[in-house]
Image (cartoon, grey):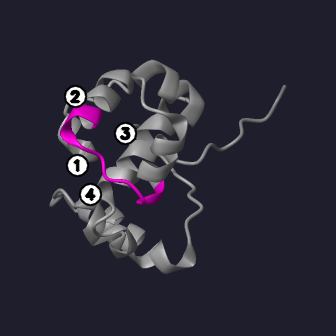
């Protein structure tokens, strides 16, 4: 007869997460986790959490949504009619993203509001 093994007590709604983050962001992530767990959650802007991206939200969003959809710049270019080199320039901040292009990008990337790219 097998002996019963002790299972660690777990709370059914709790999960353990392991994250790899840059050492400069460790305290920010810990603080955010404390806030979420305390129930005092609030919305943070990208600039508050990662000040190095302040003023770069549009191009960061473009790259992030493109990666979320698993698209290359060339594939996105074919879908939107925007030349690939211009998409690259938008992602690196060498070219601004105007309203019409933001609308095209939002539609191709399944983003509800084109203003994320502005």
Residues rendered magenta in the picture: 92-101
Quarter of the image where one finds residue 42: bottom left
Quarter of the image where one finds residue 55: bottom left
Given residues 10 and 23, the one toward you in this image is: 23
Q: In this figure, which residue is indicated by the disc labeled 1?
A: 118
Q: Is residue 30 above or below residue 80?
A: below
Q: Report how far apart the C-alphas of labels 1 and 4 lie in the structure.
A: 29 Å
- The residue lying at 56 percent from left, 71 percent from top is 22
Q: Report how far apart the C-alphas of labels 2 and 3 lie in the structure.
A: 31 Å
Quarter of the image where one finds residue 101: top left
Q: In this figure, which residue is indicated by the disc labeled 3?
A: 13
Q: Is residue 68 above or below residue 59?
A: above
Q: In this figure, which residue is indicated by the disc labeled 4?
A: 36
Can you tell which of label 3 and label 4 is closer to the viewer? 4
- Left or right: residue 71 compared with residue 14: right
Residue 41 is marked as none
Give SS at disc 1: loop
């Amino acid at each position: 007869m097998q002996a019963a093994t002790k299972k660690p007590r777990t709370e059914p709604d709790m999960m353990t997460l392991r994250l790899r983050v840059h050492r400069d962001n460790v305290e920010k992530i810990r603080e955010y986790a404390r806030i979420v767990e305390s129930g005092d959650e609030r919305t943070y802007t990208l600039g508050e959490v990662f000040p190095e991206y302040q003023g770069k939200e549009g191009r960061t969003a473009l790259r992030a949504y493109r990666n979320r959809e698993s698209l290359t710049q060339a594939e996105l270019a074919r879908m939107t009619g925007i030349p690939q080199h211009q998409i690259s320039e938008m992602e690196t901040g060498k070219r601004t993203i105007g309203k019409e292009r933001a609308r095209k990008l939002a539609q191709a990337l399944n983003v509800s509001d084109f203003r994320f790219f502005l």
